[in-house]
Image: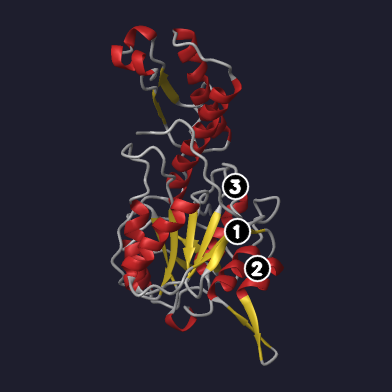
């Protein structure tokens, strides 16, 4: 039987806004509570130690340091916070995935996942797990996640829509955090749409690979820092199945925003009548979210009308079934929208004439 009133209490789990990228670092170097930090010195208190007068940094701290070190020229500031939770080192990938389920049961108010695990087994398992968080309609309570990982295996076989894999040279895999740096560079722009390709996060060394090896990485949808025309930048801004990162981030943001707007409508009205007017009031939350997404560059704008490109079908009272009316369930609001794309390459052809 479902209960009408449910109360859950947890510590150090502040609510978060859909306007923040809400990053979680999962540490496997010891059990520590889920905690949200707003500065690197705060993190140092929990995730560094002093041994023989030498500061010893945990892997989680190094990731946090890479996050906070970024300065995006297209953003007005840096990231303002990051959450970290610590678990005992899992015996295998299944153990880590089980721990992720436990963490979500306690606090699910996070979106981007970073971990200190880089083995093929762990990256493959977490990538597969990330896809299970997608909002497919099977569960309306789970919040989708996006996993960023680093690897030194250029032949890593991963093909998941919610996993982003970044290549790092083997001799640098233990000291550089390209996954955290890339997230930290783009997070301040969120929720405004941004192309993840061509970004230049600090602290990331270009891959020391041949052109044919880089071509193989592109074919495998593994991202990497490249050097072209004496310029360093991240390439190609894709998830491990080839979907562009901004497409996933944009779709997820619309999900979060619509949830927020719908709850706002229900909570700000004493009663929404089961009528056409009531349905229109609720649909207004969907319209508002679509309009907001257009201003953020997520939904495309028609060049002629200068209006967002979307359609919405607001159901009527007459379309509701007897069961829906009895259970006070509104018929589905169906909509479709065109997502704004980006230019990722360019080619020019020309003729230069010399007049004698």
What residue did someone put label 3 on? 20
How far, Cα to Cα, is label 2 from label 1? 9 Å
User: Nearest the camera: 103 or 57?
Assistant: 103
Above or below, comparing residue 265 to residue 97 in the picture: above
Q: Residue at x 60, y 22 (%)?
A: 268
Depth order, front residue of 37/242: 37
Using the image, determine if residue 345 lies above or below residue 308.
below
Secondary structure at numbered mark 2: helix
The Cα–Cα distance between marks 3 and 2, rounded to whole angstroms, is 19 Å
Question: Which residue is denoted by mark 1 in the rendering?
Answer: 82
Q: Nearer the viewer, mark 3 or mark 1?
A: 1
Place of residue 215 in the rendered image (x, y in percent of width and height, measured from the top left) = 34, 67
Question: In the rendered picture of this protein, how many numbered marks are placed on residues?
Answer: 3
The answer to whether residue 122 is above or below residue 283 is below
- How many other residues sit within 10 Å of disc 2, few (<14), some (14-19) or many (≥20)? many
The quadrant where residue 42 appears: bottom right
Residue 1, image x, y percentages: 34, 34
Residues at marks 3 and 1 touching, judged by CB atoms closer than 8 Å:
no
User: Looking at the picture, how far across and down is residue 310, in whole percent?
Assistant: 44, 25
Counting from the top left corner in percent of width and height, residue 66 is at: 60, 68
The local secondary structure at tag 1 comes to strand
Q: Are marks 2 and 1 in contact (CB under 8 Å)?
A: yes
Tell me if 59 is positioned left or right of 139 in this view: right
Tell which circle, 3 or 2, labels the residue nearer the N-terminal end: 3
- As helix, strand or loop, the secondary structure at mark 3 comes to loop
Q: Which residue corresponds to mark 2?
A: 43
């Amino acid at each position: 039987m479902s209960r009408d009133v449910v109360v859950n209490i947890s510590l150090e789990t502040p609510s978060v806004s859909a306007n923040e990228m809400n990053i979680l670092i999962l540490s496997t170097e010891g059990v520590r509570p889920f905690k949200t930090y707003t500065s690197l010195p705060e993190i140092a208190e929990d995730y560094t130690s002093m041994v023989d007068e030498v500061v010893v940094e945990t892997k989680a701290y190094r990731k946090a340091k890479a996050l906070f070190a970024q300065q995006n020229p297209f953003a007005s500031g840096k990231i303002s916070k990051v959450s970290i939770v610590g678990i005992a080192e899992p015996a295998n990938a299944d153990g880590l995935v089980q721990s992720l389920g436990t963490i979500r049961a306690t606090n699910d108010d996070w979106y981007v996942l970073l971990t200190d695990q880089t083995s093929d087994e762990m990256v493959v398992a977490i990538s597969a797990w990330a896809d299970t968080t997608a909002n497919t309609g099977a569960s309306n309570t789970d919040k989708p996640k996006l996993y960023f990982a680093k690897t030194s295996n250029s032949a890593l076989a991963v093909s998941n829509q919610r996993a982003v894999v970044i290549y790092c040279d083997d001799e640098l895999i233990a000291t550089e955090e390209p996954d955290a740096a890339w997230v930290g560079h783009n997070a301040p722009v969120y929720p405004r749409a941004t192309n993840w390709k061509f970004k230049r996060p600090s602290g990331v060394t270009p891959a020391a690979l041949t052109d044919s090896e880089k071509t193989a990485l592109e074919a495998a949808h593994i991202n990497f820092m490249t050097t072209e025309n004496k310029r360093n930048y991240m390439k190609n801004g894709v998830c491990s199945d080839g979907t562009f990162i901004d497409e996933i981030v944009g779709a997820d943001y619309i999900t979060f925003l619509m949830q927020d707007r719908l709850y706002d409508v229900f909570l700000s009205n004493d009663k929404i009548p089961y009528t056409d007017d009531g349905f229109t009031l609720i649909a207004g939350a969907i319209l508002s979210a679509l309009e907001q997404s257009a201003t953020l560059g997520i939904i495309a704008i028609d060049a002629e009308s200068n209006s967002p490109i979307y359609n919405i079908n607001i159901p009527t009272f007459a379309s509701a079934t007897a069961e829906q009316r009895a259970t006070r369930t509104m018929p589905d609001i169906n909509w479709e929208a065109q997502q704004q794309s980006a230019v990722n390459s360019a080619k020019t052809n020309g003729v230069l004439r010399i007049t004698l």
